[in-house]
Image (tube, rainbow, N blue to C red):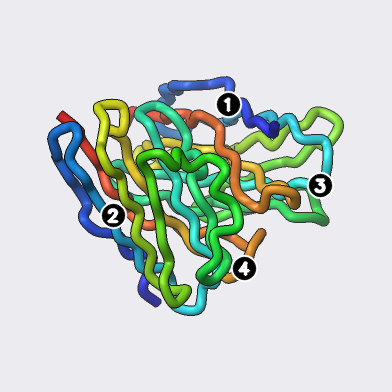
Amino acid sequence: AQSVSQHNHHVILSEAASLELGCNYSYGGTVNLFWYVQYPGQHLQLLLKYFSGDPLVKGIKGFEAEFIKSKFSFNLRKPSVQWSDTAEYFCATGDTGRRALTFGSGTRLQVQP
Amino acid sequence: EAGVVQSPRYKIIEKKQPVAFWCNPISGHNTLYWYLQNLGQGPELLIRYENEEAVDDSQLPKDRFSAERLKGVDSTLKIQPAELGDSAVYLCASSLSQMETQYFGPGTRLLVL
């Protein structure tokens, strides 16, 4: 079965620090990759997605992610975080077989002003 | 454009009682998903509908859980009887078709006492 690993469960950063959240997936076939964000009290929202093409994907609010097939990774990055980025971040894969998303356990990001 | 609507937002019941959750997907979205999210975990798929057909219900505990999507629009997820371990957030999501981006509703937070 497919699985997604997010190595950082809780990250605390100061404003303006750089962010990188790790995500590794296990499926070796064709996958679609996603990062979702859940702000406090809000529903899951799509940050960015990768289906094919340029492995460096840019999303909303200055986030980007890089798909590295050889490492089965899809890490999320942001050069300078803001207090408003405090949220929980979920990496997910969608495989063509099951046609549903498999989520990681999430990373809680806390940005201190 | 209206997003995915779910109700109720919160529900507190005693164990062995029945409970039902309702979801109205984004207009025109043929694919509807129900996910379960336990505290500190990512969402896990319970059931996926393509129009009115349940095409993946392998993770749905069928002894107590049931779902329907009459007319291929709204959907209802039911638990009868509820157990303490069912306390979680139940998320509904929809997409234009399978493997397209999924859009999530705010979820129903269930507490079973």
**Cβ–Cβ below 8 Å for labels 2 and 3?**
no
Q: Label 4 is placed on what type of residue?
A: Ser
Q: Residue at x 40, y 44 (%)?
A: A38
Q: Which mark is residue B32?
A: none
Q: Position of residue B74 (x, y in %)?
A: 38, 70
Where is B96 relative to A77, above or below? below
- Quarter of the image with the C terminus of chain A is top left
Q: Chain of mark 1?
A: A
Q: Are marks 3 and 1 on the same chain?
A: yes
Q: Residue at x 14, y 39 (%)?
A: B13
Mark 2, Cα crowd under 10 Å, few <14 / some 14-19 / many 20+, is: many
Where is B113 relative to B51, above or below? above
Q: Which mark is residue B21?
A: 2
Q: Nearer the viewer, mark 3 or mark 1?
A: 3
Q: Which residue in the protein does label 1 denote?
A: A6
Q: Label 2 is placed on what type of residue?
A: Phe
In front here: B40 or B29?
A: B29
Q: Which residue in the protein does label 4 denote?
A: B97
Q: Name the secondary structure under disc 3.
A: loop
Q: Chain of mark 3?
A: A
Q: Name the secondary structure under disc 2.
A: strand
Q: Nearer the viewer, mark 2 or mark 1?
A: 2
Q: Name the secondary structure under disc 4.
A: loop
Disc 2 from disc 1: Cα separation: 30 Å
